[in-house]
Amino acid sequence: MNQSVVNNHKKSELLGNSVPISELRSIIKQVAPTDVTVLITGESGTGKEVAAKEIHRLSKRYNKPFVTVNCGAIPEGIIESELFGHLKGSFTNAYDTRKGYFEMADKGTIFLDEIGELPLQTQVKFLRVIESGEYMKVGGSRTEHTDVRIIAATNKNLENLIRSGTFREDLYYRLRSVNIYIPPLRERKEDIEILFRHFVDEFCSRNGINFSGITDDAMNFIINYSWPGNVRQLKNFTESIITLNTGRIITVEEVKKHLNLNTESVLPALVSDYNPKNELHLIFGALFELKKDILDIRHKLDELEFRDSLHGGLFISDDDIENSDFEKIEKEVLKYYYDKYNGNISKISDKLKISSRTLYRKFKQYGLKNGRA
């Protein structure tokens, strides 16, 4: 959870000159002064939280709290306590009365990311908060009231979740009083160089680094790359390539190498087309990122034996990869990250971009220990 007060006079973080971004700014300017509930949709990494902050910045609540909650990162057993608070003694380890996020956001804005991960039972109580501002703390009997602006976001198709019975239809229509869609970065190429330059300036200023520049063909390659991870991927790429090329002009060869595009793929083509709704493919995508990291190390340290370093942590044979033995790969990846982060569910969830609830279930499925939050 992140809580902050947004400066109304601060420059907008919603960068770009493309038609979609210009239209998005126009919609936000119309929506922000009201208290209407907003649902922001779009692929992962497109900047949904940035859009939510912009709505808050331009609203009458700008000098009040802006609270961000990642619904997918909170285990189902404690999510109601996190959202609504609890009374002392209401459950094991409830040693003190605690405020929930809705109480913390009173008079301000609450941004609920990954709203599609909200459990059905909690959806009922959440709907009541939207409609009346009323809720009860866990273990309490008194009705509490909060005055908050609600903004929700998801990269999932909520209509599909309604059909599958995992998301309430009445909550869906109540949430999408206004639906704002943020297009993927590949559909707004005019914004890519602007964002790249912004991330360069921001990172270099923060770390005291002098940027030596980038060749025209390297910049053109960046602009025309598909960026499946969208703005988040572009930002991470920018910071990483600057760090590894301090004092050198960035070339197109370095860009390709950094994106692993001049290296023979270690995984079948299935990876590039994986469906983020498929858990196995999410794990497989994480494995892909891990393999890329190992390859980067091999490029930097020619004397390092790739097989020895690989076998020292994550052991997956070439036969497993060739035969697409997803379950074995999934188990090995989970075990690798479990050992690497000492069972810390929050860190593993953040690294793999998978909800904590899914990880708990997967650990149980494969006989791993439950880990810790």
Image (spheres, grey):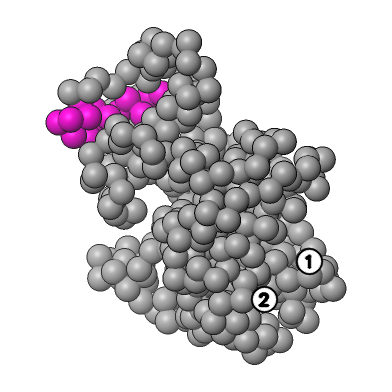
Which disc is residue 55 wearing?
Answer: 2
Q: Quadrant of the C terminus?
A: top right
Q: Does residue 278 belong to the magenta stretch? A: no
Q: Which residue is mark 1?
A: 6
Q: Nearer the viewer, residue 59 or 183?
A: 183
Q: Magenta span: helix, strand or loop, mainly?
A: helix
Instruction: Identify the residue shown where x is 78% and y is 81%.
Output: 60
Instruction: Identify the residue shown where x is 52% and y is 79%.
Output: 20
Q: Nearer the viewer, residue 309 or 182?
A: 309
Q: Are marks 1 and 2 in contact (CB under 8 Å)?
A: no
Q: Secondary structure at mark 2?
A: helix
Q: CA distance from mark 1 to mark 2?
A: 10 Å
* Residue 94 position within the rendered picture, expressed as x and y whole percent measured from the top left: 63, 41
Question: What's drawn in magenta, residue-wise?
Answer: 320-338
Residue 3 visible, this orientation:
yes
**Amino acid type of disc 2?**
Ile
**Amino acid type of disc 1?**
Val
User: Which badge, 1 or 2, comes first in the chain's sequence?
Assistant: 1
Q: Secondary structure at mark 1?
A: loop
299 vs 271, left or right, is right
Crowd band around label 1 with a 10 angstrom C-alpha radius: few (<14), some (14–19), many (20+): some
Q: Does residue 334 belong to the magenta stretch? A: yes
* Residue 275 position within the rendered picture, expressed as x and y whole percent measured from the top left: 29, 54
313 vs 166, left or right, is right
Instruction: Identify the residue shown where x is 64% and y is 89%.
Output: 30
